[in-house]
Image (spheres, rainbow, N blue to C red):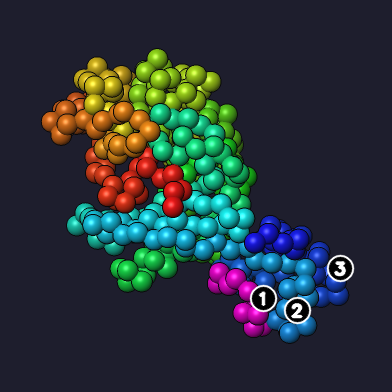
Amino acid sequence: MITTKQDIRKLSDDQLKTWLTSHGEQGFRAKQIQEWLWKHSVRTFEEMTNLSLKTRQLLAEHFEVRTLAVSKQQQSADGTIKSSFRLYDGNLVEGVLIPSLRKSEDDRMTACISSQVGCSLTCKFCATGYMDRKRNLEASEMVDQVVAIDQQAKEAYGTGLTNIVYMGMGEPLLNYANMLASVERITSPNGLGMAAKRITVSTAGIAKMIKKLGDDQVKFNLALSLHAANDEKRNQIMPINESNSLPALAEALTYFYQKTGTRVTFEYIVFNNVNDSLEDAKELWQFTKKVPAKVNIIEYNPISEADYKNTDPQTLDRFAGFLEDRGVIVNIRRSRGKDIDAACGQLAGKQ
């Protein structure tokens, strides 16, 4: 339900301190309040027990803590958990908990979170791309997804999150300020305290914003949804490429690497008879020479809106082998949560 009260988590530390002193409160209370909100994830002022009753009542009169709630939760046969989160204004986004199945990663728990309600991009293989973009998520709404999925991990598997990927609904770089603010809260010692290198932000490829990441010298990892190393082919799969061509992206990624020293990950979904030939692999190999990178080859997860099909196992192995023989670091990411529409490209905020 929307109210006229201000969302307190939109205030910076300095803004909250100024507000408190203007209302006769001591400025140091701002730090206490922010720790309650971001470190302890409390959602009511009553829980802020080191504040006086008078201060808590004052805050409640002027502010609210806008929260999200799990509207629906589904568990896959492989242990993946997908949640539909209802936001304060009634909109829905989806987030996914992905426990590792690899013995080498027994304790790996990854949260895949959304950055927008819907998406303004129209990637042809992605269910979210067939939705309209309704709005950007606030930083607090991205953090709240992490908090909720971390709780799910502890309840279902007895251990908290180890990794976060901004790979859910939406394009994070088109919600740049809020995405960056959410990372700051997640990594801050006064927030969730997670290491930045445990976070990966995935983009469909917006060159000027990739350069801005370099200018801001971000510490988290960057992944590019590539899916074709040929402009004509990528234009068909991902229309964003028409205004952000592969040469422009290569220049931006090189700039990003020079500024941050962070190796980029190329995400590459293999579609049957579309981008899975040895010629496609050769073009991808040539593109990996432009910037230090590794390649995640991802199985395609069919959606009702598109006619793409996953490539066969032999073709996938031949494609990966071609790259590995030429020194490219390759990981094959098997589909997770496909039976509950939780896999890569399947999130759509449906009830």
Q: Is residue 104 something one can see in this rendering?
A: no
- Mark 1 or mark 2: which comes first in sequence? 1
204 or 212: nearer the eye?
204
Q: Quadrant of residue 88?
A: bottom right
Q: Which residue is found at the position 28% from the left and 47% from the top?
A: 338
Locate residue 197, reporting x and y percent: 43, 51
- Mark 3 or mark 2: which comes first in sequence? 3
**SS class of the residue under badge 1?**
helix
Q: Is residue 343 something one can see in this rendering?
A: yes
Judging by the rendered image, the residue that carries numbered circle 2 is 57
Tell me: 138 left or right of 18: left
Q: Which residue is found at the position 47% from the left and 44% from the top?
A: 169
Going by the numbered disc 2, the residue's amino acid type is Gln
Instruction: Tell us which disc is closer to us: 3 or 2.
Output: 2
Going by the numbered disc 1, the residue's amino acid type is Phe
- Compared to 178, does 147 lie above or below? below
The extreme top residue here reads 232
Residues at marks 1 and 2, CA–CA distance in whole angstroms:
8 Å
Q: Main secondary structure of the magenta part?
A: loop
Q: Residues within 10 Å of mark 1 (few under 14, many from 20)?
A: many
**The magenta segment:** 40-50
Q: Which residue is found at the position 44% from the left and 30% from the top?
A: 123
Q: Mark 1 near mark 2, Cβ–Cβ under 8 Å? A: yes
Judging by the rendered image, the residue that carries numbered circle 1 is 45
Judging by the rendered image, the residue that carries numbered circle 3 is 22
